[in-house]
Image (tube, rainbow, N blue to C red):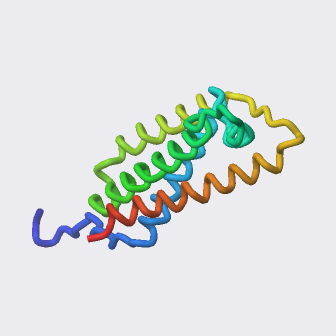
Amino acid sequence: MSQHDPDLSLPPAPSSRALTYVTAVTCGVLAALALEIYLSRVGFDLVAGWISLFSTRSMQLRTAGPWYWMAGLAFVTGGAVAAALRRAPPPWHRFRLLRWVAGALIVFVLAQIGQSQASASAGRAGAQVAANLSAMTAAALMALCGAYFTARR
């Protein structure tokens, strides 16, 4: 580069800690939501298990398993996203192809999961909404914990 050529490269933008946390929590909640849709498709329902919880021979893993799986996936996803964002500050010009491949993969996976049809009965729609909201709140808190533990220095 000669002395009179302008420098066309962009300086690295400062990485915002709040943006890292928001992105990690969003990705964690979306991963937990996708897992919840998949689990309801294969027969694990968040509400149906609680009905049989107090019976004499209830399967407690079937009742609590989806809750733990969703919280665990949100924790791992939030931590992985926060770690990736903290180690590779923007601008991500070098990762342009990787971003397109990852975006296409995410769209494909969500399309596969979304093909299932929701079959909630009208009698327990309120219980289903309450269970989903509490599960997503737990997923958001776990994703925030995962992001905090990996992004702190």
Q: Which residue is at the front of the view, 153 or 53?
A: 53
- Position of 48 with respect to 34 (left or right) is right
Q: Is residue 74 visible?
A: yes
Front residue of this view, candidates 22 and 10: 22
Relative side of 153 to 143, left or right: left
Residue 31 visible? The answer is no
Q: Residue at x 41, y 65 (%)?
A: 20
In front of the other: 83 or 140: 140
Relative to 86, residue 107 above or below? above
Residue in the foreground of this view, choosing between 101 and 29: 29
Residue visible at 57% across and 36% down?
110
Q: Residue at x 42, y 40 (%)?
A: 102
Q: Measuring 62% from the left and 26% from the top, which residue is drawn there?
A: 42
Q: Is residue 50 above or below residue 16?
A: above
Horizontal arrangement in the rendering, residue 105 relative to residue 137 (left or right): left
Quarter of the image for the N terminus: give it: bottom left
In the image, residue 128 lies at what x, y percent?
A: 76, 46
Percent x, y of residue 150: 32, 61
Q: Is residue 21 above or below residue 126?
A: below
Give coordinates of residue 96: x percent, y percent: 36, 47
Q: Where 80 sits versus 61, above or below?
A: below
Residue 104: image location, x then y, percent: 48, 36
Tally of numbered discs: 0
Q: Quadrant of residue 151?
A: bottom left
